[in-house]
Amino acid sequence: MEVVGLGVDMVEVARIARAVSRWGDAFLARIYTPLEVERSRRAKGRNQHLAARFAAKEAVMKALGTGRRSLSWCEVEIGADQAGKPIVLLHGSARRVAKRQGVESVLVALSHTSGHAVAAAVALGEPPKGSLLERRE
């Protein structure tokens, strides 16, 4: 398995807090899956939690090579394993794009301060035949 894509994003926590305050549940439903919203309600530092996941979704889209084009925010879900490590779940078009790119898994790392959240994503897999990333031997 090799690196097929890499993405990074940073967002101001206040920007996400303003959006939640202004648009409320409509904003949350547009950007986050129901499970992500539920987890955020239990999180200490909810705005930082939401901002980190927003940055992670952006980073994953960049790692898949799409940016926000053609993907819905909710097609990229940031979950957690039993130890609390963030994991990426792809749905719908995001899953189809990943498959077409040869992506088998996406690793993600999140971090935040009171003012900023940052995320990095690494797409792992086997690049499709004929792509610029195809291994040359």
Image: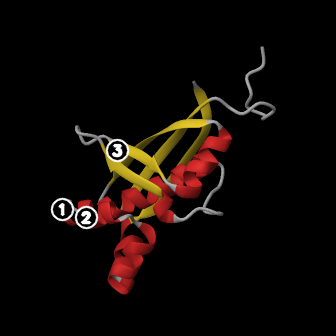
Circle 1 is placed at which residue position? Answer: 42
Circle 3 is placed at which residue position? Answer: 86
Question: If you read the primary sequence from the N terminus, does the residue marked by circle 1 or circle 3 appear first?
Answer: 1
How is colour applied across the structure in the image?
secondary structure
99, above or below 20, in the image: above
- Disc 2 and disc 3 in contact, CB within 8 angstroms: no
Give the amino acid at mark 3: Pro
Q: CA distance from mark 1 to mark 3?
A: 16 Å
Q: Nearer the viewer, mark 1 or mark 2?
A: 2
Q: Position of residue 82 (x, y in %)?
A: 23, 39
Q: Position of residue 119 (x, y in %)?
A: 44, 49
Q: Residue furthest top?
A: 137
Provide the secondary structure element on which disc 2 rests: helix
105, above or below 66, in the image: above
Q: Is residue 67 left or right of residue 86?
A: right
Q: Nearer the viewer, mark 2 or mark 3?
A: 2
Give the amino acid at mark 1: Arg
Provide the secondary structure element on which disc 3 rests: strand
Report if residue 86 is visible in the image: yes
Circle 2 is placed at which residue position? Answer: 38
- Which residue is pictured at 39% across the width and 52% down the height? 78
Q: Residues within 10 Å of mark 1 (few under 14, many from 20)?
A: few
- Which residue is pictured at 43% across the width and 61% down the height? 54
Report if residue 18 is visible in the image: no
Give the amino acid at mark 2: Glu
Q: Residues within 10 Å of mark 2 (few under 14, many from 20)?
A: few
Q: CA distance from mark 2 to mark 3?
A: 15 Å
